C-alpha cells in the first residue's frame, strides 16, 4: 500500500501524506530558495514535506510522470488524459494489444546539448527492468517482454500479455544513455546530478534543506516564464502554516483546519484537488491481535469514518472502504461498511475475545492491544490515529498511538500497525497490486500488512493480465468483496488536498492527485506554463 520507497515522500503506505506538503512561494528570492521571497516575477519557491531519496528515474523518481527535470513518452493534461510528450502521438497498438509503437519527437535535446533518440528510451526501460537495478516499482512494468528501437525515431514495446493500462505507464521519465550508462545505476552520481529533457534543470540539492532548479532555455516545449524554481523542505504542518502566514512561503498544501485560517486573506486563493489519496491502518498478519480476522472485521465496523470526515477533514474528503474511492467506476457497490459498534462487539464475542476487568478484551492469554505508529509532524495522520484508537477502545481494543520518523517506523512495520496512506489515480492495478499481493508482503512499503489471500492474489493477476474491461471489473470487484470478509487494512478516509497560494500568477490549476506528492502535484503541476499577472 504504501510502497514505493522512492516517490518524493514515502507513502505511509507508501508513505507520505497530505503532510507530504508542498508550499509555493511565488515571490522568490534573489538567492534561489534562500528564504523570504524578493518579489521577483520570474521566480517561485515550493516547500515540500519530504524530499525524494533520488532524482534518478531508474531508481523510481518521477515514475508517474511530470518530474520537471525529465519527460516521458507521454504525459497527462489537467483532466488526466494522456497526451504526447517525447512521442509525437499516442502509441499505435496492435490488434492483439501486445505491441505498442511510439514515434518520437525530432529535434529534442537533453539539457547537456546531446540529442534525444530511441536508444535512450530503450536504455531507460531495459535498465529499469534489470534485476540488478534497485527500483521498487519495476513490477508495474512486468508486462514488458521486449523494447527495441526502430531507427532513431521509433520505439516498439512487445508485451507478454495485454496489459490494459500500459500506455499510462509510459509517462516514465527517459534518461540519457550517454550519461547514465557510464556509472553504477544504483550508486552513481546521476541520482543527485541528473540530466534530462524537461523544462527545468537541477542547480543544487542541499539535503534536508532545499532543491533548486532553473528553467531550461532550450526546452522543446518552450522556455518557462518561471526562471527559478526552488523546493524548500518544510516537514511540519504547523511550521508550514506559520511560514505561509509570515510571508516566508507564499503557498502550501495544508490540512483543512490550518487552511481555514487563510479563508479571509484577500491575497491568497485556496485550490482544491480531488484525489485518490487515502488514509488507512495497516494490520500486520504477523501480530497475534491484528492478524486475527475477527479483530480486523470488528475494527472495520467500529471505526466512525463519517465522523473523521466531518471533524478531521472538515468535510474535505469522504469515507474510504478500500483503495478505490466511492464514485470511481472501479468501486464495487455494496462494499461500504457503515459504523456499527454493536456488530463489532458481537464479532469479537463470538470469536472468543472477552472483555477483561478493565474492559479490554483478551483471548487465550493475549490482550487485544497493539501500538499504532504515525509520522511525526503530520497532523492529519495524528488526528486519524487518535480517532481510530478512540473508536477501537469502545469495542474493547486498546491501541497506543506513537509518533516517529520513517527511520523509526519502518523496522517495526511487520509487527506494529501504521497509520499509512496511498492511492493512485487511473488504473486499479497501479495501487492494488503493490498493496495486496502476497508475493510482495513485507517488501519495504509494498504490502505493509503482509496481507495474504489466495483469492485476492488470483484476482490481482486476472485484473492485470486481462485485456477485457468487463473481466477486469469483475476481478477488482471480487477483491473489494474479499476485503470485507478479511480486511488486512482498515481504510478510513479519502482526502481532498487543499492548497493555499498567493494570487500572483495566471495558469494555476489542479489535477486529480495521487497520495504521493513530489514535483508534480499541487497547483504547480504545470508551473512551466505559468505567467505573472499583469
Image (cartoon, rainbow, N blue to C red):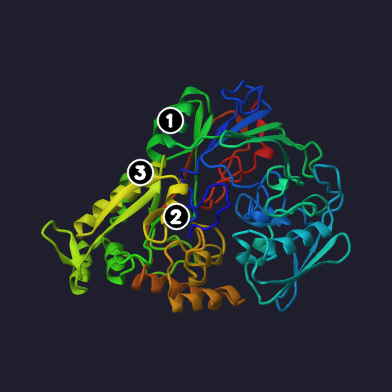
Between residues 2 and 277, which one lies in front from this camera angle? 2
Residue 274 image point, x, y percent: 49, 50
Instruction: State which tag comes first along the sequence, 3 or 1.
Output: 1
Please tell me which residue is depicted at 28% across the width and 62% down the height of the picture.
Answer: 299
Neighbour class for label 1 at 10 Å: few (<14), some, many (≥20)? some
Residue 296 found in image quarter:
bottom left
Q: Residue furthest right?
A: 151
Instruction: State which tag comes first along the sequence, 2 or 3.
Output: 3
Instruction: State which tag comes first along the sequence, 2 or 1.
Output: 1
Question: In this rendering, is residue 520 above or below 434?
Answer: above
Residue 404 image point, x, y percent: 40, 45
Residue pointed to by mark 3: 314
Question: In this rendering, is residue 518 above or below 440?
Answer: above
Q: Nearer the viewer, mark 2 or mark 3?
A: 2
Tell me, for residue 90, which label it has, or none: none
Residue pointed to by mark 1: 262
Q: Dot 3: what SS?
A: loop
Residue pointed to by mark 2: 411
Residue 429 found in image quarter:
bottom right
Residue 313 in view in this figure: no
Residue 142 found in image quarter:
bottom right
Residue 136 image point, x, y percent: 59, 60
Callout 3 touching callout 1 (CB < 8 Å) = no
Left or right: 453, with 70 as reference point: left
Q: Dot 1: what SS?
A: helix
Callout 2 touching callout 1 (CB < 8 Å) = no
Q: Nearer the viewer, mark 2 or mark 1?
A: 2
Neighbour class for label 2 at 10 Å: few (<14), some, many (≥20)? few
Q: CA distance from mark 2 to mark 1?
A: 38 Å
State which quarter of the image contains the C terminus. top right
Residue 123 in view in this figure: yes
Question: In this rendering, is residue 332 above or below 380?
Answer: below
Amino acid at each position: 500500500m504504501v510502497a514505493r520507497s522512492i516517490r518524493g515522500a514515502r507513502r505511509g503506505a507508501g508513505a507520505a501524506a497530505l503532510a507530504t506538503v508542498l508550499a509555493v512561494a511565488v515571490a522568490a528570492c534573489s538567492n534561489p530558495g534562500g528564504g523570504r521571497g524578493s518579489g521577483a516575477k520570474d521566480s517561485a519557491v515550493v516547500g515540500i514535506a519530504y524530499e525524494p531519496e533520488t532524482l534518478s528515474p531508474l531508481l523510481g523518481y518521477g515514475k508517474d510522470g511530470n518530474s520537471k527535470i525529465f519527460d516521458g513518452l507521454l504525459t497527462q493534461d489537467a483532466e488526466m488524459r494522456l497526451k504526447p510528450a517525447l512521442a509525437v502521438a499516442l502509441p499505435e497498438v496492435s490488434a492483439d494489444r501486445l505491441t505498442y509503437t511510439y514515434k518520437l519527437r525530432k529535434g529534442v535535446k537533453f539539457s547537456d546539448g546531446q540529442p534525444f533518440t530511441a536508444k535512450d528510451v530503450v536504455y531507460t526501460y531495459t535498465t529499469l527492468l534489470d534485476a540488478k537495478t534497485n527500483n521498487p516499482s519495476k513490477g508495474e512494468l512486468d508486462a514488458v517482454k521486449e523494447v527495441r528501437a526502430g531507427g532513431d525515431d521509433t520505439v516498439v514495446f512487445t508485451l507478454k500479455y495485454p496489459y490494459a493500462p500500459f500506455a499510462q505507464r509510459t509517462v516514465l521519465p527517459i534518461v540519457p544513455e550517454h550519461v547514465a550508462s557510464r556509472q553504477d545505476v544504483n550508486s552513481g552520481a546521476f541520482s543527485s546530478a541528473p540530466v534530462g529533457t524537461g523544462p527545468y534543470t537541477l542547480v543544487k540539492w542541499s539535503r534536508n534543506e532545499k532543491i533548486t532548479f532553473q528553467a531550461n532555455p532550450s526546452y522543446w516545449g518552450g522556455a518557462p516564464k518561471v526562471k527559478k524554481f526552488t523546493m524548500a523542505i518544510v516537514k511540519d504542518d504547523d511550521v508550514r502554516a506559520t511560514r505561509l502566514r509570515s510571508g516566508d512561503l507564499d503557498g502550501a498544501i495544508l490540512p483543512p483546519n490550518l487552511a481555514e485560517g487563510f479563508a479571509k486573506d484577500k491575497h491568497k486563493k485556496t485550490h482544491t484537488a480531488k484525489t485518490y489519496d487515502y488514509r488507512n491502518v495497516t494490520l500486520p498478519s504477523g501480530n497475534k491481535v491484528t492478524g486475527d480476522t475477527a479483530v480486523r472485521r470488528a475494527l472495520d465496523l467500529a471505526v466512525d469514518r463519517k465522523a473523521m470526515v466531518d471533524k478531521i477533514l472538515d468535510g474535505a474528503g469522504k469515507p474510504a472502504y478500500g483503495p478505490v474511492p466511492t464514485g470511481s467506476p472501479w468501486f464495487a457497490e455494496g462494499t461500504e461498511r457503515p459504523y456499527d459498534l454493536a456488530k463489532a462487539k458481537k464479532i469479537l464475542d463470538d470469536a472468543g475475545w472477552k472483555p477483561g476487568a478493565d474492559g479490554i478484551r483478551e483471548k487465550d492469554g493475549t490482550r487485544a492491544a497493539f501500538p499504532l505508529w504515525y509520522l511525526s509532524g503530520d497532523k492529519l495522520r495524528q488526528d486519524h490515529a487518535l480517532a481510530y484508537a478512540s473508536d477501537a477502545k469502545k469495542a474493547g481494543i486498546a491501541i497506543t498511538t506513537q509518533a516517529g520518523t520513517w527511520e523509526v517506523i519502518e523496522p517495526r512495520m511487520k509487527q506494529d500497525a501504521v497509520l499509512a496512506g496511498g492511492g493512485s489515480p487511473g488504473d486499479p492495478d497501479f495501487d492494488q497490486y503493490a498493496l495486496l499481493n502476497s508475493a510482495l508482503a513485507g517488501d519495504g512499503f509494498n504490502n505493509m500488512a503482509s496481507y495474504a489471500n489466495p483469492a485476492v492474489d488470483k484476482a490481482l493477476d486476472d485484473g492485470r493480465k486481462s485485456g477485457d474491461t468487463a473481466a477486469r471489473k469483475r476481478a477488482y470487484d471480487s477483491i473489494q468483496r474479499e476485503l470485507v470478509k478479511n480486511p488486512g487494512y482498515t481504510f478510513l478516509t479519502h482526502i481532498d488536498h487543499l492548497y493555499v497560494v498567493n494570487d500572483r500568477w495566471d495558469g494555476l490549476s489542479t489535477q486529480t492527485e495521487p497520495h504521493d506528492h513530489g514535483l508534480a502535484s499541487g497547483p504547480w503541476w504545470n508551473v512551466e506554463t505559468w505567467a505573472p499577472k499583469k
